[in-house]
Amino acid sequence: MSVSNIVLIWFVSLLVPASALDNGLALTPTMGWLQWERFMCNIDCDADPRNCIREELFMEMADVMVKEGWKDAGYEFVCIDDCWTSHRRDAQGRLQADPKRFPSGIKKLADYVHAKGLKLGIYADTGTRTCEGYPGSLGYYDIDAKTFADWGVDLLKFDGCFMPDWHQLGEGYTNMSRALNQTGRSIVYSCGWPLYEWQHQQPDYEAIGKTCNHWRNYKDIYDQWSSVKSILDWTADHQKILVPVAGPGGWNDPDMLIIGNFGLSHDQQQTQMALWAIMAAPLLMSNDLRNICPKAKELLQNKQIIAINQDPLGKQGYRTLKGDSFEVWERPLSGNRLAVAVMNRQEIGGPRRFIISVAMLPSWQLCNPKCNVTQILPVYKEMGVQNLFSEVMVQVNPTGTTLLTVSPIKSSPHDTL
Ligand code: GLA
C-alpha cells in the first residue's frame, strides 16, 4: 500500500462517526449482487439447473458482472444467501457447502470471484437454524468465522431466525462481530439484528452501529410496488431514529434492489433506484444479470445516481415533505450540494406538475446567491443556473420520481446581487 493510500485511509477514518463499526470497511454503501429475492431457495438443480442455487450461478453472475460493465459501475460483491450448506456440519463441526450443488467448495468459488477482481459474500444465521432450516451458527460463531476467513470470504450476511431467546440477539451479533475481527480478514458484516429485535422492542442503534457495517430494519422486499412503498413509508416514519446512525462504516439496509425483475413498472424502478440513493442504502441487486432488459441495466448503471448513493459525506437522506400525493426526499451531499427526489404517489391520472421553491424546500437556501440544477431522472437534463427566488417545475409520472442535484455556485467579488 502506498503512503498516499495510508494517509487517505487515516484521513477518511477521522470522518467516520464514533458509532460506526471501525473495521475500515463499507466507508460507502456496499454494492453488489445478492441471490435471495430472485433465486430464493431453489435447490432443484435437476429440473431447473439454470436458476438453482449452485456454484455455476455465482460464477456466471461474476462473469457477467465483469463483461457487462457492472464491476466498472461499482458493483463489487457476489453474494450467496440461504440454502448453500449441506444439512450437516463436518466431523470438525465446520459448515460445509452442499456437495452436489457446490462440488468445488466455497474456497474455489472465492478464488474464482477474486480472480475477476470481485468479492464473495456468504450467509449464516445467529440462531439454531437459518430461515430456510439449514444449520445455524449458535454455538459455532468462532468456528464459522474462521471457516469463512479461511475460504477467503469478504462479506457475511448474518440472519436472525431461530434465536431461542430474542434477548440474546445483541450478544449473538456482537460475538460474531468479535469472531470476524479476530480472524484478521476484512469481512463486511451485514446484520439482521434490528429486523428481529423490532418485533419485541426498539433496538439499540448505537450498539448496532458499533457492531455491523449494515443492518436490515424492516421486512423482506418482494417483487411488487406495494413492498417498495411499505419500505419507504416505514423508513420515513422512523427516520428520526435511523438517519443519525448512518454514516461511513455503518448503513441502514432497506433490502435488495429488485430492478430488472417482473413486478415494477419502469417508473417504479426509477423510484427504487432514486430513493435507495437518497437513503444511502447498500445497492445489492437481486435479479438475473444474464438476462436483463437494457432499460433496467441502464438505470442500475447510471453513474450520477450511483455517485449520489456513494457520496463520501455519507449522510443518509430523509423525507422533508408529504402532501397532495407528493413526497419530497432530500440528501445532503459533499461540497454543500443536495440531492432532491420528488415522488408522485398518486396512482391514477398522468404526469403531475410540482414546483420547487424556497417556500416548499427550505434547503433551497443554498441557491443564494446562485445554484446549478441538474435533473438526473427520469432523463438527464441540465436545468441551468437558479437563484433563491427561482421556481423550478418538474413533471412526475404516477409512482415515478424526479431526481435532481442542486449545487451552490460561490459568489465572486464581481457579482452584484
Ligand atoms: C430472511 C432474510 C432474507 C433472506 C431469507 C433467507 O427472510 O430477511 O433476506 O436472507 O431469510 O432464508
Image (spheres, helix red, strand yellow):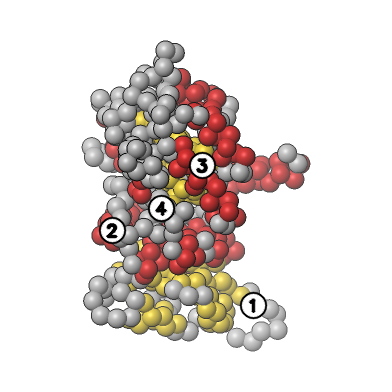
Q: Residue furthest bottom?
A: 416
Residue on which the image places disc 1: 411
**For the residues marked 4 and 1, what is the alpha-carbon distance in whole angstroms?**
46 Å
Discs 2, 4 touching: Cβ within 8 Å:
no
**For the residues marked 2 and 3, what is the alpha-carbon distance in whole angstroms?**
28 Å
Q: Considering the image in quadrants, where does the C terminus appear?
A: bottom right
Residue on which the image places disc 3: 59
Q: Which residue type carries mark 3?
A: Met
Q: Residue furthest front?
A: 46
Of the residues under marks 2 and 4, which one precedes in the sequence?
A: 2
Q: Considering the image in quadrants, where does the N terminus appear?
A: top right
Residue on which the image places disc 4: 287
**For the residues marked 4 and 3, what is the alpha-carbon distance in whole angstroms?**
15 Å
Discs 2, 1 touching: Cβ within 8 Å:
no
Q: Of discs 3 and 1, which sits in the foreground?
A: 3
Location of residue 102 by image quarter? top left
Residue 385 higher or lower than 330, as above or below: below
Q: Around disc 3, counting alpha carbons within 10 Å, would you say few (fewer than 14), some (14 to 19), or many (20 or more)? A: some
Residue on which the image places disc 2: 224
Q: Of discs 4 and 3, which sits in the foreground?
A: 3
313 vs 266, left or right, is right
